[in-house]
Amino acid sequence: MAEVALRPIEDADLDALFDQMRDPESVHMAAFTADDPNDRSAFDAHMAKIRARDDVTNRIITLDGRLVGSIAAFVIEGDTEVTYWIDRAHWGQGIAGQALALLLAEVPTRPILARAASDNVGSLRVLQKAGFAVTGTEAGYANARQAEIEETLLRLD
């Protein structure tokens, strides 16, 4: 069985992350993305900002040593949230669930929150399998869809 692991982000990872985060199908599914996923300068500025923060745990997800995504826990408005991005070529293989379990073991803060577009069934399933419970929904503007959509809110105690 393939091994999923987490490691800190390195400068050499940025090109691969940028490419993953601008895949049109992935961007549509994530919905709440950068204003322009093809803006490398904005991507680099964002990554520099979050990599400098001490309240962010930002990791690369590897599969047998190969970069297949990223995952993070970050503080926003006093709450800790998780987010992840898996290369579309690796969707449906259980990688997100394994990576989330590893991150949750590394970040003991509870409660921890998550959110996903309500039509992102795969991501919602990953979060619920990890023990997150749906706490509600809210409407939010999704850059990737250029529209307001429903977002499901989740919490792990």
Image (cartoon, grey):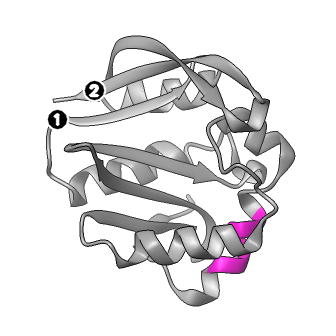
Which quadrant would residue 147 be assigned to in this image? top right
Label 1 crowd bin: few (<14), some (14–19), many (20+), radius 10 Å = few
Which quadrant would residue 80 be assigned to in this image? top left
Which amino acid, by three-letter code, is at mark 2?
Answer: Arg
Looking at marks 1 and 2 on the same chain, the residue that comes earlier in the sequence is marked by: 1
The residue tagged 2 is: 155
Point out the residue furthest to the top here: 136
The numbered disc on residue 111 is 1
Which amino acid, by three-letter code, is at mark 1?
Answer: Pro
Most common secondary structure along the magenta stretch: helix
Residue 144 place in picture, x, y as percent: 75, 37
The residue shown at (77%, 53%) is 36
The residue shown at (25%, 72%) is 54
The residue shown at (31%, 72%) is 53
The correct choice, above or below, for 59 with respect to 80 in the image is below
SS label for mark 1 = loop
Is 110 part of what is drawn in magenta? Answer: no
Q: What is the spatial separation of the Cα atoms under label 1 and label 2, in whole angstroms?
A: 7 Å
SS label for mark 2 = strand
The numbered disc on residue 84 is none
* Contact between labelled residues 2 and 1, with CB atoms less than 8 Å apart: yes
* Residue range of the region highlighted in magenta in the rendering: 14-19
The residue shown at (44%, 53%) is 99
